[in-house]
Every structure is written in C-alpha cells, then in structure tokens.
Amino acid sequence: MDGSDQVRVADVERERVAAALAQAHGEGRLTLAEYDERVRAAHGAVVRADLAPLTADLPPAPAAEQAPRRRPRVSPLRAALAVWAAVSVLNLVIWVAVSVGTGAPVAPWWIWVAGPWGVVLVLQALAARAGFTPPGPFGCAVRTPR
C-alpha cells in the first residue's frame, strides 16, 4: 500500500465506482445482493483503499466508454435556419388563425417576415459553400478553432 491509497475519496470517485458496479450488474457479472453490498460500501468509502477491492474482480471498462461524450456542435447557420423555420411557422399559424377568426382571408403579411429573412439565410448558405466566412458581430473578425 502506497500513500495514495490513504487519500480521502471524493463523491465523484464514489459515483464512478457505483456506475461501474451498476454496469457490471446490468451485464450480469454481479447478483443483486452483491451489487447492493458493493454500492453501499462504495458510498461509505473514506479512502481510496476502500474503493479498490469493490471493482478488483471486474474487467476494466473500455477506454471509449470512459471518455466523456461531447454533443455534436451545431453550426450557426443550421441554428439560424431552425429559428427562422420556427418563427415562420408561428407567424403562418397566427395568420391562419386571424383569417379564420375574421371569416375572410387576410393579406399574407407573414411573407414579409419569412421572405427577407429566408433570402438572407440562403445567401449565407451559398457564401459558406463558396468558402466565405461571414463577419462576426459588429463586423469583428471571428476566430475559427483549429
């Protein structure tokens, strides 16, 4: 036993061991009684030496599962397109409701909201496809991550 075994454990370490035990139970490597006993011991652990024997007889988790999963990054253009679509649909629904409520067709004012905004988005998409990057807010240059 070296000195690091006597270091007090944090809640994160206890939860990590509890998650490994839950996975082992889900795979059928531990019975419910073993799982319950080991999880209780994990949550009651004080130092690292208390946690080590709880997973010693279990296979290590694959490295890919240990790495935190990152959400795929949504492009700003795709986000702007989603917002445009939501606002356009909302305006269309309001226009239909007003038309039905008055009993007569109302001028399609929603086109003046969706149309110019949509044209700007199409131009931005074409520019992005051609390799042009749009300026940032207030005309400032935007750094792109490498």
Image (cartoon, rainbow, N blue to C red):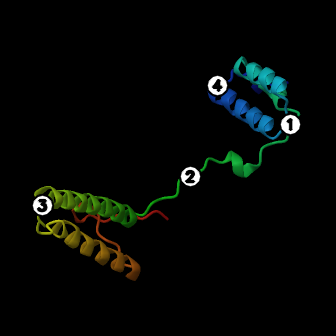
Does residue 48 lie above or below 144 as drawn?
Answer: above
Residue type (three-letter) at the residue carrying disc 1: Arg
Which tag, 3 or 1, sits closer to the chain's start?
1
- Quadrant of the rendered image containing residue 74: bottom left
Residue occupying the far bottom of the picture: 130
Determine contact: label 4, label 1, CB under 8 Å.
no
Q: CA distance from mark 2 to mark 1?
A: 29 Å
Q: CA distance from mark 2 to mark 4?
A: 24 Å
Residue linked to disc 2: 70
Can residue 49 be seen by looking at this rendering? no
Q: Report the mark closest to the observer, 2 or 1.
A: 1
Residue linked to disc 4: 10
Determine contact: label 2, label 4, CB under 8 Å.
no
Residue type (three-letter) at the residue carrying disc 4: Ala
- Mark 4 closeness class: few <14, some 14–19, many ≥20 residues within 10 Å: few
Q: CA distance from mark 4 to mark 3?
A: 67 Å
Residue linked to disc 3: 103
The reply, left or right, for residue 27 in relation to residue 81 is right
